[in-house]
Amino acid sequence: AEDEYLWIGVYSPAGELEDQLSLPSEFDASIGFDVAWDPAGGMVVSGSVDTGGGWQRLVRKYDDSLTEEWTVDGPSNGDFGLAITADDHGHIVAAFAENCDFTDLFGYHDCRLVLRSYDQGGTMRWQHVAEDGASEFTGPILFRPGAKADIEVDRYGYVYVSALHDRPLGGGETRAQWWAEMHNP
């Protein structure tokens, strides 16, 4: 995706395209993996961007007219913002695959899974590195059902995340398996 760009479209309830934007002038390449409406107004997007030095994670907040309100990104470490959601108070929670190794055109592996929560202004509230911080999570892999991490928040503020986990079997071998975690708000 060396010349591909994140595209966002807003459709009416009747399925008509009402508004759209993409990020071609800002980055060498960009990928969007998830979008969520923010009950406090607007929407949030998670993905990755490349400014010429490698993929870095991205979280961006837009208002109702798709004007950027704030952006949080990270270093060019092979990081991906895979999933995002917002709670009833406008707190944003995102799941990232970080420090990934590129395997081929279709995926990344040896990632660490990191959750981060942001307030309405984009300031980080907390973060959690899954497991012991080891490189045991699989990044975005096409054609593998459910491989993309997912995240949700319930009405009480508890955060639920699921991902594809590379379970060590010994002797350097691993087996992909489902993994899920619940976090106290």
Image: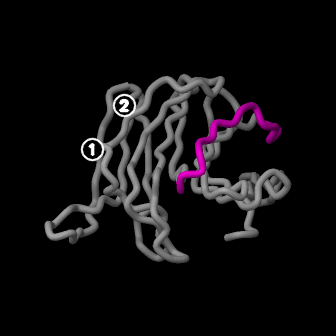
Q: In this rendering, would 55 be left or right of 110?
A: right
The residue positioned 80% from the left and 59% from the top of the image is 16
Residue 131 tag number? 1
Compared with 33, 87 (above or below) is above
Extreme residue in the left direction: 170
Q: Which residue is mark 2?
A: 158
Compared with 41, 177 (above or below) is below
Q: Name the main secondary structure of what is drawn in magenta.
A: loop
Q: Which residues fall within the magenta stretch?
A: 64-78
* Residue placed most toward the observer, 4 or 154: 4
Q: Secondary structure at mark 2?
A: loop
Extreme residue in the front direction: 53
Residue 174 picture location, percent across and down: 23, 68
Labels 1, 2: front one: 1
Magenta stretch holds residue 74: yes
Q: Quadrant of the N terminus?
A: bottom right
Q: In this rendering, would 155 be left or right of 61?
A: left
The residue positioned 46% from the left and 53% from the top of the image is 99
Q: In terms of sequence position, does the residue under pointer 1 or pointer 2 come before the other?
A: 1
Q: Secondary structure at mark 1?
A: loop
Q: Splitting the image into 4 quarters, where does residue 118 fall?
A: top right
The residue positioned 81% from the left and 53% from the top of the image is 21
**Amino acid type of the residue that numbered disc 1 sits on in the rendered structure:** Glu
For label 2, the crowd category at 10 Å Cα-Cα, with few meaning under 14, some 14 to 19 and many 20 or more, is few
Residue 122 picture location, percent across and down: 63, 28
**Amino acid type of the residue that numbered disc 2 sits on in the rendered structure:** Tyr
Q: How is the image coloured?
A: one colour
Query: Gap in Å between the C-alphas at discs 1 and 2?
Result: 18 Å
Residue 129 picture location, percent across and down: 36, 39
Q: Quadrant of the C terminus?
A: top left
